[in-house]
Image (cartoon, grey):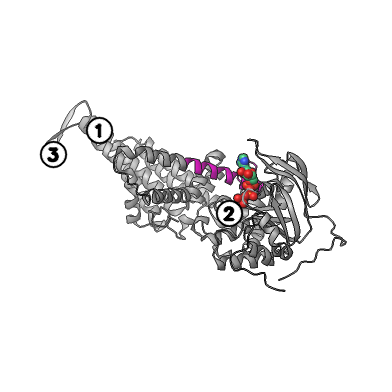
Amino acid sequence: MGAGHRHELYLPGDSPVHRLPPQCKLLAVLAFAIVVVATPREAFWAFGLYAVLLAAVAAVARVPAGHVVRRMAIEVPFVLFAFLIPVIGMGERVSVLGLSLSAPGLWAAWNILAKATLGVVASILLAATTEPRVVLLGAQRLRLPSLLVQIAMFMLRYLDVIVGEMRRMRVARESRGFAARDVRQIPVIARSAGALFIRSYERGERVHLAMLSRGYTGSMPIIDEMSASVVQWASALALPAAALAVLGCAL
Amino acid sequence: MTVTPVSPASSETVNSLEVSRLAYAYPDGTQALFGVDLAIGRGERVALLGPNGAGKTTLVMHLNGILTPGHGSVTVGGVPVRKDTLKDIRQRVGLVFQDPDDQLFMPTVRDDVAFGPANAGLRGAELDRVVTGALARVGMLDFAGRPPHHLSFGQRRRVAVATVLAMEPEILVLDEPSSNLDPAARRELAEILRSLDVTVLMVTHDLPYALELCERSLILSGGVIAADGPTRELLADEELLAEHRLELPFGFAIPSL
Ligand SMILES: Nc1ncnc2c1ncn2[C@@H]1O[C@H](COP(=O)(O)OP(=O)(O)OP(=O)(O)O)[C@@H](O)[C@H]1O
Ligand SMILES: [Mg+2]
């Protein structure tokens, strides 16, 4: 089944960061992001220090820089948007390399880029050191709404099944001479999408029956007791604490 | 072939499964069952045969209370299937669905096998023991950490069996367990089923498989039990088979004892 040749976020390993309980890491990343967002955009050196902090975490977790950089593609739309702001922005103009750019626009672009990049890198580090299902267990431990956690869990489990079903339907279409060339073929595609929806829905019903058969009563049972020690909390929260110290100096 | 002796006179007189005068119509009005009567003793392995649309899956869904009888009753190990006994019943009846992708919904094999016992309240070391035991019985212990969708179909079917074994059921009910399996996987599953010490009810279109695994067979046809007897005798009765749209595979001859 179609898995394996995707860009896996998770990087198997046994570093101290990998071993931290997921709820600690989730909370640490969240707190770090809040501190970053709260930092005034003029404090260039603070952002530099945040980057150094993340680099230190990456080093401890033994996540190579290339792994992080390749997965930053997710940020590209923001980058494009950020580049547009100074061009179309209003207010006082400055001239950079012969282009007339808006000064408040430049500040806004820098603000978005710096903060988004730090947030994305922190999330990539979380994902690189924590399996997706374990992230969800962490979310469950943090008492996030259990319905949301369960939906995410089923997406994780059935994504490959649904993609596989989609591929089989495409093969079936194409082996009967269908090729999606222009708009006239949209109704065919739409009908297959409808069929896919029904199939997925019916599978959902059958899965629900299977869950009921094994005593499901609406909430996921806690299978792994993943309690975190004080030391583990302290080491995970060292990252946002250090960031907070930087912020304190910047203010 | 191992023979599991069933002596009703023994101390265990309670049948694993008793269905009496069970009738059911789907909400759209399709009457699927017209009064099914059957009893399966503890430790028996019984095959449920019948043509497409006979009502086999409908019957199976009554055994753990997914469907509620329109008329009649179902009793598992002496406990009647009712709203207030559902939790207990679902612990006693292990249902293995036809498509393992429907049955394996957790992110890893281990989590999936743990799902049932954890719902029943097991935690920690005891949960681990049960999960390990169930996976070992189907020979899938080495795959505990793998996501189910990375397994072959036969492996997924085996894990599906483990998920219900982990609940230590009174009776294991399998809906077409040999479908989509290659001959080797089919034989491995047969070995697993034969090694288990539980009552088994197996829905199948695979008559040789029924003969291989089950001493006794039931034929469900048109929503009623049309025949009940030793598998060997039923399969030797060509007239009976033809009457219920059952056919032995081409060239298959019932091996002599
Ligand atoms: N959800 C449903 N709503 C209405 N009618 C249904 C439903 N499911 C099954 N039926 C009907 O009930 C009858 C029995 O179906 P059932 O699925 O139990 O047959 P089966 O013996 O399992 O067949 P197969 O060997 O093909 O799996 C059939 O006539 C079928 O069309
Ligand atoms: Mg069926």
Are labels 2 and 1 assigned to the same chain? Answer: no
User: Going 31% across and 37% down the picture, which residue do you hit?
Assistant: A184
- Closer to the camera in the image, B155 or B255: B255
Three-letter residue code for mark 2: Asp
Is residue B143 visible to us here?
A: yes
Is residue A43 visible to us here?
A: no
**Mark 1 crowdedness (10 Å alpha carbons): few <14, some 14-19, many ≥20:** many
Q: Assign the C terminus of chain B to one quadrant of the image.
A: bottom right
The residue carrying mark 1 is: A85
On the image, the x and y values in percent for residue B55 come to: 66, 47
Q: Secondary structure at mark 2?
A: helix
The residue carrying mark 2 is: B111
**Mark 3 crowdedness (10 Å alpha carbons): few <14, some 14-19, many ≥20:** few
What residue range appears in magenta? A196-221
| Label 3 with label 2: CB-CB less than 8 Å | no
Left or right for B230, reference A198: right
Closest to the camera, between mark 3 and mark 1, is: 1
The residue carrying mark 3 is: A97
Three-letter residue code for mark 3: Leu
